[in-house]
Image (cartoon, rainbow, N blue to C red):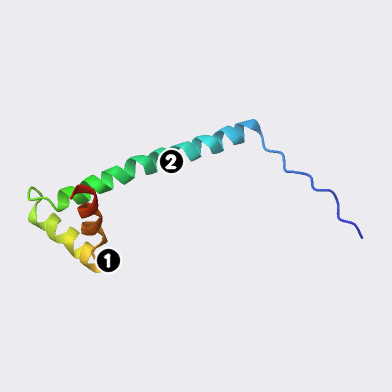
Amino acid sequence: MSMPPYVPKYVRPQDIALSRARLKRRLIGIAIAIPLIFMFLAFGYSDQAPAFLRNSIIAVDRMLGYPIIGLLGMILG
């Protein structure tokens, strides 16, 4: 008993372009989000941040085992 030959599924050029556009949009969003999150966390640890923001970022950092302050210390220190 032999297997039938593999026939790849036809994908329209419009679908390929749409898929590529979605991928680009996701990658650009990720590339923008990472520095924004870093800036938000760095601001949260500064003296200029409101007390509730500073306390909430420190509480989240404490729950995670202080990776945020360690990362900020390596980059900024």
- Asked whether the residues under the numbered discs 1 and 2 touch, taking CB atoms below 8 Å apart as contact, a structural biologist would say no
C-alpha gap between disc 1 and disc 2: 26 Å
Q: Give the number of callouts.
A: 2
Q: Position of residue 31 (x, y in %)?
A: 37, 41
| Of pointers 1 and 2, the one earlier in the residue sequence | 2
- Under mark 1, the amino acid is Leu
- Would you identify the image quadrant in which residue 11 lies? top right
For label 1, count other residues whose C-alpha is less than 10 Å away and answer few (under 14), some (14-19) or many (20+): few
- Under mark 2, the amino acid is Leu
Q: Position of residue 30 (x, y in %)?
A: 38, 44
Q: Which residue is mark 1?
A: 64
- Would you identify the image quadrant in which residue 61 lies? bottom left
Q: Residue at x 23, y 53 (%)?
A: 74
Q: Residue at x 25, y 67 (%)?
A: 65
Tell me the tag on residue 28.
none
Q: Which residue is mark 2?
A: 27
For label 2, count other residues whose C-alpha is less than 10 Å away and answer few (under 14), some (14-19) or many (20+): few
Q: Is residue 33 above or below residue 73?
A: above
Q: Secondary structure at mark 1?
A: helix
Q: Position of residue 29 (x, y in %)?
A: 38, 41
Q: Position of residue 34 (x, y in %)?
A: 32, 46
**What is the quadrant of the N terminus in the image?**
bottom right
Q: Is residue 18 above or below residue 57?
A: above
